[in-house]
Image (cartoon, rainbow, N blue to C red):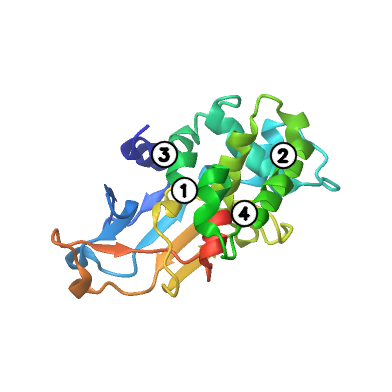
Amino acid sequence: MSLETLLEKAASYGVEVDAAIEFAETPDSGLSAYVKPDRVSGPPRIKLTNPFIVKPSDAYSAFGITDTENLENETSIFKLYIASMRNGSIQCEKFQPYIDLLPSLEEIHSPLSMSSKSLYVFSNTSLQGSIISKKLESLKDDFGSVLKYNNRIEFEDYLWAHLIVTSRAFPYKIINVHAKPHLVMLLPVVDLLNHKPNSKVDWRSDANGNFEFVYKQGVDASKAKEDGKVEIFNNYGPKGNAELLMG
């Protein structure tokens, strides 16, 4: 599905994107967000309504999980849910345009999905082969612990979901103060923005569990591309290269 399909679906659920923000795909940055300085009248914002946020409760509902008080492996269950939508074993018309637009396992270029022969490039680094192997074994254990909820998933699907969640997820506690600290959520549209450390952004929520992204960095017209647009970024906090590659 296309970017336009995602934005249309988001709008149908009340999502509001600042009129100054445009999304486009470029060879260098992939899907990214831009603004034209002459159209900016205040900090650019994206308001995401609660129903259009991919939440742990969506996963519990899809898998028929009703007792969540003593539930283990919640994050693994959430990853399984994302993987299930990707491979079609769970249908979700609302989130499908977002899921379909996410990069493939090949496009993510993680060491976790590389062949053993290709891993030589990480020799004598913090990502040497033994560390990658241990991480894969740990992920396979996690996968096995939640497979009972959907046995139509392959490990490759789960690995893809792991990389998506670890690179794009936001703390669920932002919109639900009662949530366990380790729970996460995905924010369609908002996560189209690329990550840049030190970008000044604000994440807000209201009593209804809606989410608002505010870009507070300021728009520097001197950084505009030939088309007059300036890219704006999100900030997921400090992440090292190893963390970005491995999840």
- Give residue 143's mark: 2
Q: Amino acid at mark 1?
A: His
CB under 8 Å between callouts 4 and 3? no
User: How far separated are the C-alphas under marks 3 and 1?
Assistant: 16 Å
Numbered disc 4: secondary structure:
helix
Q: Which residue is mark 1?
A: 109
User: How far separated are the C-alphas under marks 4 and 2?
Assistant: 21 Å
Compared with 119, 205 (above or below) is below
Q: Position of residue 52 (x, y in %)?
A: 51, 43
Q: Identify which residue is drawn at 57% across, 55% down.
A: 246
Q: Earlier in the sequence, mark 4 or mark 1?
A: 1
User: How far separated are the C-alphas under marks 1 and 2?
Assistant: 21 Å
The nearer-to-camera label among 3 and 1 is 1
Q: Identify which residue is drawn at 47% across, 60% down.
A: 212
Q: Nearer the viewer, residue 247 or 115?
A: 115
- Give residue 129's mark: 4
User: How far separated are the C-alphas under marks 4 and 1?
Assistant: 15 Å
The nearer-to-camera label among 4 and 2 is 4
The nearer-to-camera label among 2 and 3 is 2
Compared with 59, 242 (above or below) is below
Q: Earlier in the sequence, mark 4 or mark 2?
A: 4
Q: Earlier in the sequence, mark 3 or mark 1?
A: 3
Q: Earlier in the sequence, mark 4 or mark 3?
A: 3
Q: Which residue is mark 3?
A: 101
